[in-house]
Image (spheres, rainbow, N blue to C red):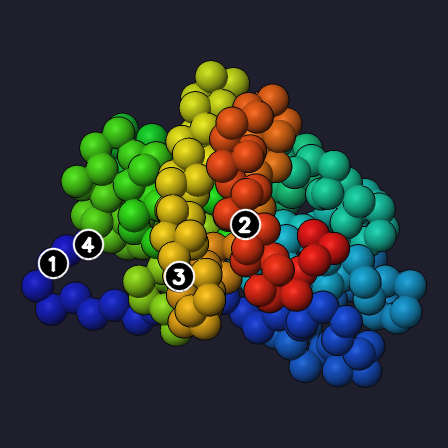
Amino acid sequence: LDVYGEHEYPLPAMSLPPPGAPLDGLLGYEAVELFADRARQHQPDFTLDETTAGAVMEICRRMGGLPLALELAAAGTRRMGVVELAGALREASGQDWHALLHTTARDLPPRQRTLFDAVAWSYSLLSPDEQTVLRRLGVFAGHFDAAAAAALAPEPAAIGSILARLVDHNLVAPESRRPERWRLLEMIREFAVAQMGAAELQGARLAHARHFALRQSDWQSDWLDRAYLDQIEDDLDNFRAALRYAIAAGSAALAHQLGAAMGRFWERRGLIQE
């Protein structure tokens, strides 16, 4: 509210199980516990067993451990089983989720009845420049730094203040142990990508690829430096995404620029197969 005497208490997302977590310990994670409890409200015979565990973990991770998202996902079990729900969410990635994640509860405000509306309500509170930056941040794979975000922004010099406001709106999150890097929850990233038209999406992906193609120029001299290689590994998912885009777009020069230098990194880190 930005009023005198106001205190902020950051509420973290619910704890999530890591990939491959054993079945007997799943209910020790807050996100799984909440989802299972709410799923039983809609499917009284629901049980967390070997058949459903994988789908439940996938749903919880896709919902980012957010309570509202988990509640709405659990409401989907009124219409389908959790395995079917996980598959439907996978297929709807980056699309409008109205048909999948909603509740029929009449005592909730409209913006809390569907996950898409909840994110769209927050998005509507942003300024046009903030909306543009958020949309384009959707092309990042994993976390990113300010320099990478600036490469996609309409006004690169303002990226610091825009990222701070997006964090205030809980649409972008700083890395817990890396405050100089940021990330989008998967559902926010999918929403952001869905808001772009074809031309803007292509432009954002091209700017992303060009940025990472230029960033590897130091590899020619520093590729034997372990500390430098560690920094490159921070953005490895983004380098890979940039290379995939360049190949898919048929940009041979850009793909060669990325691939030729990445070969040094792959060799040094034992990723010869890649």
Q: Are marks 1 and 3 in contact (CB under 8 Å)?
A: no
Is there a contact, CB below 8 Å, between mark 3 and mark 4? no
Dot label at residue 23:
none
Residue at which label 2 appears: 262
Q: Residues within 10 Å of mark 2 (few under 14, many from 20)?
A: many
Horizontal side of residue 198 vs 267, given as left or right: left
Above or below: residue 168 compared with residue 128:
below
Going from the N terminus, do you reach mark 4 or mark 2 first? 4
Mark 3 or mark 4, earlier in chain:
4
Mark 1 surroundings: few (<14), some (14-19) or many (≥20) residues within 10 A: few
Identify residue type, mark 1.
Val
Q: Which residue is mark 4?
A: 1
Q: Secondary structure at mark 1?
A: loop
Task: Tell me, yes or no, whether the two marked residues, 2 and 1, touch with CB atoms within 8 Å.
Answer: no
- Residue at 46 percent across and 66 percent down: it is 224
Disc 1 designates what residue?
3
- Residue drawn at (54%, 69%), measured in percent from left and top? 14
Q: CA distance from mark 2 to mark 1?
A: 49 Å
The answer to which quarter of the image holds residue 46 is bottom right
Picture layout, residue 111 above or below residue 196:
below
Measuring from the top left, give residue 144's x and y in whole percent.
41, 53
Splitting the image into 4 quarters, where does residue 125 fall?
Answer: top left
User: Which residue is the extreme one toward the right?
Assistant: 51
Q: Which residue is mark 3?
A: 222
Gap between marks 1 and 4 measured at Cα:
6 Å
